Amino acid sequence: MRTAARSLSLLSGGSTGRGWSLSLFVRGASEASEGSRLCFSTDGGDGSRVKIFDRDLKRKQRDRAAWLMRPSDCFVDSVAENLLDRLEDCKKTFPTALCLGGSLEAVRRLLRGRGAIEKLIMMDMSCDMIQQCKEREQDKSDKNIETLHVVGDEEFLPMKESSLDLVLSCLGLHWTNDLPGAMIQCKLALKPDGLFLAAILGGETLKELRIACTIAQMEREGGISPRVSPLAQVRDAGNLLTRAGFSLPGVDVDEYVVRYKSALELIEHLRAMGETNALLQRVPILKRDTALATAAIYESMFAAEDGTIPATFQVIYMTGWKEHPSQPKAKQRGSATISFKDIQNQFGNGS
């Protein structure tokens, strides 16, 4: 597992949306094509699934983010670039690929022929986000890729089994109520020797905001309420890949420190990314004095000498392959013909 830290500066103006939402952060699909649309229920129907996030609210937040989205976002672009770099490490080509939710536009813009993709399916739960991607598709210099746009839900993947060579997800899957189930569906949709690549936000994300908000709520309200969504820890990522049935699992971790002029600019950036509160057990409104106290505590505890405030984003990159006979496999236990003791006797005596 590789861990790296990066620092980014995000001091340009953000969206003009007002209001405070200090929290980070369906079988449903409809095809966004002219003249036809297929719609499915957003609920499983049995009501037995554990639900942490309000997916209908998240869809609305993604709709809003489609119109607040910046032409270029240094943090989102860095994550997408690092995710796509992994395709350059593969000699294999991926003719048919699916890009799931999250930073769709950044992935499409930065693809630049990597993976030798011939057909790219871009899927998001937000119809407005898909529409924005379709409009920006006209400006792409890479016209050799056939691009399809589908409105659908990561929790209920509308893809046939063994139909894809590659599944990509950049900053999207951490909002699913059943992350292992979503990853299992991705594996089923892959052809043998197909590749799953995903980047999700990790548990250390926005740790400064968590601290400031907790202190402010304790001081002003005498208690705390959930303001930041539960996120996967690094140790969980490998288990998720194994549980989903992927072979050759790999996990990398990057930590990005993004600097803002103020806490308000951080909130505006989260809105533009569609990363605001979608917890089912959320408190809908944050009191004004609590919000102002949070901003003040944030700046007093974490502000740099130049007045900017840092926000940490931990990104976990996951890599997994669908099983295939050509992949290397571990030997059976007890099949070794040479013992470590013999190796030590042969090479260790001269040291």
Image (cartoon, rainbow, N blue to C red):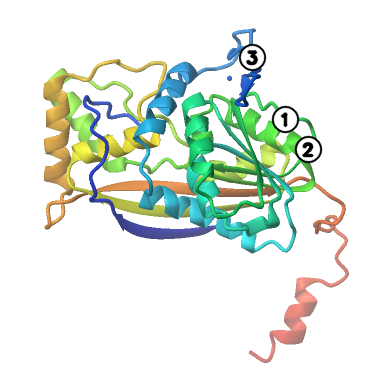
Answer few, some or many: residues within 10 Å of disc 1's Cα (few below 14, many 20 plus, some between 14 and 19).
some
As drawn, the label of residue 159 is 1
Tell me if I can see residue 25 in this picture: no
Tell me if I can see residue 283 in this picture: yes
| Disc 1 element | loop
Give the CA distance from mark 3 to mark 2.
21 Å
As drawn, the label of residue 40 is 3
Which residue occupies the foreground of this view, 322 or 137?
137
Of the 4 image quadrants, the one containing the N terminus is bottom right
Residue drawn at the location 67% of the way across and 48% of the way down:
320
* Residue ID for mark 2: 163
Above or below, comparing residue 324 to residue 283 in the picture: below
Q: Answer left or right for 182 relative to 187.
A: left
| Disc 3 element | loop
Cβ–Cβ below 8 Å for labels 3 and 2? no
Cβ–Cβ below 8 Å for labels 1 and 3? no
Say which label, 3 or 2, has the lower sequence index.
Answer: 3
Above or below, comparing residue 82 to residue 287 in the picture: below
Expressed as whole percent of the image width and height from the top left, the position of residue 65 reads: 39, 31
As drawn, the label of residue 272 is none
Expressed as whole percent of the image width and height from the top left, the position of residue 305 reads: 11, 57
Expressed as whole percent of the image width and height from the top left, the position of residue 254 reads: 45, 54
Q: Amino acid at mark 2?
A: Ser
Cβ–Cβ below 8 Å for labels 2 and 1? yes
Answer few, some or many: residues within 10 Å of disc 3's Cα (few below 14, many 20 plus, some between 14 and 19).
some
Give the CA distance from mark 2 to mark 1.
7 Å
Give the CA distance from mark 1 to mark 3.
13 Å
Q: Amino acid at mark 1?
A: Met
Q: Answer left or right for 75 relative to 104.
A: left
Answer few, some or many: residues within 10 Å of disc 2's Cα (few below 14, many 20 plus, some between 14 and 19).
some
Q: Answer left or right for 66 relative to 206.
A: right
Expressed as whole percent of the image width and height from the top left, the position of residue 286 reads: 22, 20
